[in-house]
Image (tube, rainbow, N blue to C red):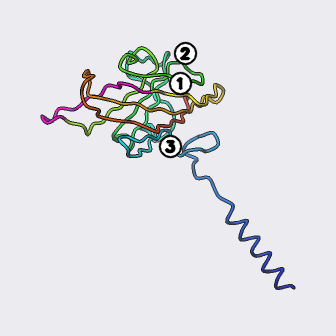
Amino acid sequence: MKLLNKVLTLALLSLALISCSSDDNNNIISPNNQSTYAMTAKINGVLHTMNNPFNTNEATSSIWSYYPNDEYIQLMGRYGGVVGNPEITLWIKRTDLVIGTYNVGVDTNGTSTHIDIIDNSNFEADNSPIYEDTTSGSITITAIDTQTKIIQGTFEFKARKESSINSELVHDITEGTFNYRYDVE
């Protein structure tokens, strides 16, 4: 009987140790620790996991005058860090900081909530870079906490060669997610 109690105790202890786990996601502050990455997306079917250029989930300051920081929050995801590529940038208009879906396209560039991709590996036959325009898509804010300044959501969009609505699709971005801290002091 003593042997059976020892075996049973050992089995219960082993089960308890197996079910315990540690959270190594301390570099990214995320509600419920849902993701280690600030942004994920499938670009032409290939999954990319991204953080901002400084490898955190903090919103970065915009350098574009048509997306001023007092009117927009810039959520940048770059695959591969400081010199990584590609880069997806969401500009969330501060008046849109509520749960909801926002359609994006060429006409939203510089005027409302918008999204873009920069892919420095795309080149024309003459070695000039291909610049992309977002032609259609959406950004959905699924959660926002104005106290902790955390915004989460999903996105999808299509991009074609710049200023050429009839050109071929350059990028098809699907299953995008974001989880950022904004207005970080």
Q: Which mark's residue is nearer the viewer, 2 or 1?
A: 1
* First along the sequence among labels 2 and 3: 3
The type of residue carrying mark 3 is Tyr
Rendered position, 176 above or below 1: above
Q: Quadrant of residue 7?
A: bottom right
The type of residue carrying mark 2 is Thr
Counting from the top left corner in percent of width and height, residue 69 is at: 47, 19
* First along the sequence among labels 3 and 1: 3
Badge 1: how crowded within 10 Å, few (<14), some, or many (20+)?
A: some
As drawn, the residue found furthest toward the front would be: 166
Question: What residue is drawn where x is 86% and y is 85%?
Answer: 2
The disc placed on residue 95 is 2
Camera-side residue of 55 and 46: 46
**Real-space Cα distance between discs 2 and 3?**
26 Å
Residue at disc 2, secondary structure: helix
| 34 relative position to 176: left or right | right
| 78 relative position to 34: left or right | left
**Real-space Cα distance between discs 3 and 1?**
22 Å
The type of residue carrying mark 1 is Thr
Q: Quadrant of residue 67?
A: top left
Rendered position, 26 above or below 4: above
List the residue tagged with mark 3: 37
Camera-side residue of 139 and 121: 139
Q: Which residues are magenta?
A: 124-137
Residue at disc 3, secondary structure: loop
Q: Quadrant of the C terminus?
A: top right
Camera-side residue of 171 and 25: 171
List the residue tagged with mark 1: 101
